Amino acid sequence: RSRRNFRSRVATYQASMAELLFLACASFTAQNSLATASSLKSLRRSQQSTSSQPTAISPKRLFTRSTGLISKFNASSAEKAFFGNKSFAVVPQTASQSSSFSITCESDNRPISEERTGKNEIVMKFGGSSVMNAERIREVAELMKAHLRYQPVLVLSAMGKTTNNLLAAGDKALAEGIVDIAAVRELHFKTCAELGISTEDIEPLLDELQKLLTGISLIKELSPKTRDYLVSFGERMSVRVFARYMNDKVGVPAVFIDAFDLGMRTTDDYMNAEVDPKTYPLIKKNMEERRASGDLRLPVVTGFIGKDQGGNITTLGRGGSDLTASVIGAALGVKEIQVWKDVDGIMTTDPRIVKAAQPVPSVSFEEAAELAYFGANILHPLAIIPAMRSDLPVRVKNSYDAHHPGTLIVRERHFGDRLLTAMTMKRNVTVVDIFSTRMLGQSGFLAEVFDVFRNNGVSVDVVATSEVSISLTLDQRQAAKHLDAIVPELEKWSTVEVHSGKSIISLVGNVTRSSEILRKVFETLSENDIRVEMMSQGASKVNISFCVDDDLAVTCVNELHSKFFPSVVPAAKPEAVFV
């Protein structure tokens, strides 16, 4: 039901049992979330089978929040509905007065057997900061309890700084011959102790880790293949700790699953493996077999890792856990993929740069990919692809503020009155200018230029061309590593100029109104005496990018943000599958 319908019902102060419960619960939660269709239908069926007469009620008696009692009204049977992370019970006031009921908010404590009966409807992924210690694990456990009705699949990253600690232990074993897992062991043992759970599930992994590091120290070898095996211990221990806590302390049956046992197959490009298409049917088959066998436990799955065709453990590179969640969601055809971070979703710009940055309620897949590529480190662009191909909404939420609606990523959305959705800044960029009169009327010239970059394994960010020149950008690491080889090749038939110390400013939004956007951009830059080095509006229909000097980039972003997002105006929350 829409909010307008809510208001019309409240204005009449008349409602059936089903409608009163619906109104009271929705108002109590103060969220946009609606009851599940099945809950509302069951209430209406009950009301229709007992009495079709609505009962008048005073608006002052609609809520009494301090006692949990919301309202009393006449009806003839008890019911229960569930909204967001709360349950609402309709209970007879006395045995003799079967027509007098109260609606009471209580915890979501339905038996698990009632919850875990259907297909998985949602995938929830939590990053390392969300499970960094016992306190955070307890918070995530409460969130999981609140979402059990959706048959969630949980995907976890390694706890806190575990991945960095594992890599440091590997480097120490290689360089110094010292095997030291104290930091890793201490974090996990301390967390288990504070949660009051056994360490028996992680002790075999710690023994295995000790043996691996001993091998590294003896043979003095730490290849990409071995590094993948090494860092996999983080995710594998994380899911075991969480599943043990859910089983022993929360009372929710859970099972830890290593992603490769669920069907995650990858290429053998260690440290940056790609997902094998065989993964999707394998995951679907394995999950269906679990349900068919009656295994309705909460699946707690490792992010970031898989196995190649030879059975060797691989990692998916940056954003790997997000990608795992997206792949599982696409394989199972869930209704929503939720990626829980430590921020309120995608922001209008980096809040570390602009204090007035605002959360963005909704973006398209294309916008999200552009923002991710050009510096918004919320989601890796590769993580979006499986969801985008399957047209599955992705919601970015804040595990530290579960009630914030976050950002919903969908195929298409309405821009409204805003020109821009968000802006990003990518620093330490090198601009390469290539001039050649051979470009005039010549076919294949651009192919020759980009063959040089391809042959050196270099990816280009932004490109702008004219009749006799090409300007393109590289990130600083690639420039430092490859330009000494690239420039001499290009100079065989062109003049090359290299400009380092630049930043790419990317404006993502409604580029159908690009004239208005560019007018405001150049007015702002002119007012602040900021010179643009190059500009590109290419194939993307949502992105305009330009380069400025690094030392002016922060000023540029702040000034542009104040022009395009002058004040915090509460935007309409996007329609969501789950909140």
Image: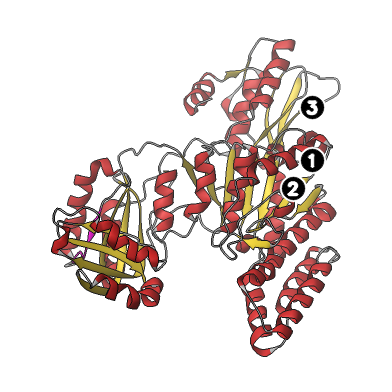
Q: How is the image coloured?
A: secondary structure
* Above or below: residue 349 compared with residue 151: below
Q: Secondary structure at mark 2?
A: strand
Q: Which residues are magenta?
A: 531-536
Binning the other alpha carbons within 10 Å of mark 1 as few (below 14), some (14 to 19) or many (20 upward) gives few
Q: Which residue is mark 1?
A: 290
Most common secondary structure along the magenta stretch: loop
Please count the marks in the image.
3
Task: Decide if residue 562 is in sight here.
Answer: yes
* Residue at image point 79% right, 71% down: 208
Separation of residues labelled 3 and 2 (CA atoms): 40 Å
Alpha carbon separation for disc pair 1 and 3 = 43 Å
Q: Which mark is residue 93?
A: 3
- The mark that comes first in sequence, 3 or 2, is 3
**Is there CB contact under 8 Å for labels 1 and 3?**
no
Q: Tell me what residue is drawn at x 61 percent, y 60 percent.
A: 268
Judging by the rendered image, the residue that carries numbered circle 2 is 299
The residue type indicated by label 3 comes to Gln
Relative placement, left or right, of 533 versus 115 is left
